[in-house]
Image (cartoon, rainbow, N blue to C red):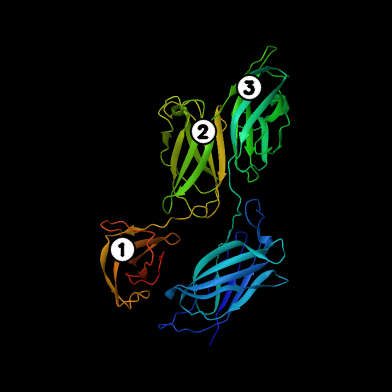
Amino acid sequence: MKKIKFIYIISTVCILLLNSCNSSQEENIQESQKAVDFEVNLGGINRAERFLGTSDEIKKLTLDVLRIYGNREIVKGFELTQEENSGKWEGTLNNLIVGFDYEITGHAYKIDDDNSTFIEIFTGSTNHNVTEGTNILSIRMAPILDERELTVPRITRINRPFQMEKSDNASIQISLTNSDKEPLQYRFRSIDKDTLMSLDAGLGGVFTPASGVHSDDNGTYGLIESTYTSPNLVSKQLIQVRVSNDLNIGVTSTIDIYVTGETESDTSINTNPVIESISGERLDNSTIVWTVQISDDDPFSELIATFEYMFGEFRSFGTTNYKSGSSDTSSGTGEVKVVMNDYDDLDDGMLLLTICEGGSNHLGSCNYGQIGSTSMSFELIPYAYSQPLIVDTNDFETGSVSHNDSPSSDDSSDNFTHFVVNTVDPRKNNYDTFIILLNDCLEENTSQININCSGDKFINDDIDNDVDDYGKP
């Protein structure tokens, strides 16, 4: 038998360049084994703050090869070896057929702290049609997330002086919560109202401390406190406060302080909107609905929400929907929903959400850094929101099935109920149809399936007779 040769090259996000030598496909495809040589070159940027590992930690690389026709697994966990001088990964594989399509999945591993266990840190797959000669494949491999919970810290209260004298000192205190009880980073600064850039000490004053790390104490966070020294300038200062966790997910609030001449100052309590939670749900192949729970001391109808997608391809948002959490018009709690269009599994930009006070029936101006606003940034991770499985069922029908059609049957025929299931493959947007047979699983005199039915017999039949079985139960 002959052999087939493959060459793999993985770059920063494990992107492989595809360059295949073309040759004519035989009219009748023959199974011929050919030597498969894999050559893998690794490199990339460290981003270990939320992933299990980085490209420079890879110590083992394996491949899974699945023949798409017949859904047959050719090899699983085929291990490559690393060439010492070039750093490339190489290997040879047999039993591939010229002219056939294969799904090839790569797995990259690092060594655990015990120096004996391998942990998978990258994975990715691609489809490839085998041709004569040398085959070069392209695989995009995505980093695997660690198991840490992605939580959002909340600023619940800000105590600050409403006005103060020039070159005077006053305390600013921040109350906050965070569900994972991990240390938080904070930052105070005076910003320009037009550019939102930080001001120097002469124009914006000084904070002591201006930044730092704040940890919880017996399950609760104490106050974050900073002493603000106002500039020797009569002015209105915009003070920006940011609190974030070690994954750089955080909230930002902006307050104002009036700097005047020599006069007495008052201390007032001002509460900006609080973002209680944010969640995303994949609706279909290209849309995600974002749901945000918010609360404020102002009526909910006076709150305005804006959504922006930054540092990535343009993503549009649909109409923002508001739902009050109470029939009391003075209540400040409620829910905001919006649909983001054109979502892609590889999106890794940042969602910026800003909640502002001062609107009327949710209409008005709302921008990042606006007085009385709270903003939250949420960085998207590739493949974080997978496509849901869509199942459509037709009418239930009853009948019987022969012994040959039902491997689990002990009798020559069984009473059964069947229904047709249409499924969708989220990776390829392809559909398939199956028939599922259930034995004695319908509740008597109803059309409801008893999901706890014991002894059920499930028979999957690809009734549309196509090659690929997408989402087969």
Of 225 and 188, which appears nearest the observer?
225
Horizontal and vertical percent position of residue 221: 66, 35
How many neighbours does mark 2 have within 10 angstroms: few (below 14), some (14-19), or many (20 or more)?
Answer: many
Q: Position of residue 288 (x, y in %)?
A: 45, 48
**Closest to the observer: 269 or 3?**
269
Does residue 415 lie above or below 225 as drawn?
A: below
Amino acid carrying mark 3 in the image: Ile
Residue 434 at x, y = what percent? 34, 66
Specify the amino acid type for callout 1: Phe
| Residue found 44% across the figure and 33% down from its top | 325
Image marks 2 and 1: residues in contact by CB distance under 8 Å:
no
In the picture of the structure, the residue carrying the numbered disc 1 is 419
Residue 431 lies in what quarter of the image?
Answer: bottom left
Image quadrant where one finds the C terminus: bottom left
Q: Quadrant of residue 173?
A: top right
The reply to whether callout 3 and callout 1 are in contact (CB within 8 Å) is no
Task: Kindly identify which residue carries mark 3.
Answer: 257
